[in-house]
Amino acid sequence: MWLLCCPCSGKGAALIADGYHARTDGLTSLAVVIGALGVWLGFPLADPIVGLLITIAIFGIVWQSARSVVTRMLDGVEPGVIDDIHHAAEHIPGIKIIDAKARWIGHKLHADVAISVDQDQPLSQANKIAASFESEMFEHMPALAAANVRFSSGEAEHDHPNPRGHLHG
């Protein structure tokens, strides 16, 4: 049941869609019983009304499933994934996230995070901070398979697409 409540649990989009399908089957069975009961009690419109409600429910669940599958196909991630990366950083003193990206590759999540630390620290200490941050990400994100943590100057990298100032022909 936990899988149905948490679409970002690290399970595949197809498995989530199967969960939605199972939920639809259960709701449909319950609605059929209610419709049959209504007809049996003398309300003949109960059956078509229940049929329309079932149709609306199925369209809603198809929409949820399709949105999830298409998002994954287009390398999208749920907004909570990036929030989890930032949350993991909150547990590590002296770290600032400059840029965070994530994508699903199959059933596993891959993250690429640029961080900034105090430049007056020795490199060994900065590496320990980066390793601690990586450990926190793996702890907070069970579906995480790979994390690339790299140091950045402290400016958003997308502001400077070509840091060396020259073009490649």
Image: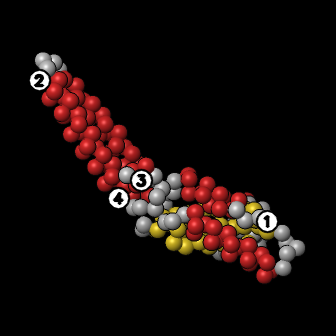
How far across and down, in percent of the image, does residue 164 sit? 76, 73
Sort mark 3 into few (<14), some (14-19) or many (20+) by Cα contacts within 10 Å: few
Q: How far separated are the C-alphas under marks 4 and 2?
A: 38 Å
Residue with the most extreme bottom position: 124
Badge number at residue 40? 2
The kind of residue tagged 4 is: Leu
Residue visible at 74% across and 73% down in the picture: 129
Which residue in the protein does label 3 denote? 2
Going 27% across and 39% down the picture, which residue do you hit? 27
The residue wearing badge 4 is 15
What is the total number of numbered labels drawn onto the structure image? 4
Question: Residue 107: x, y in percent?
Answer: 42, 66
Specify the label residue 38 is tagged with.
none
Nearer-N-terminus badge (1/3): 3
Q: Quadrant of residue 29?
A: top left
Name which quarter of the figure residue 95 lies in: bottom right
For the residues labelled 4 and 1, the Cα–Cα distance comes to 39 Å
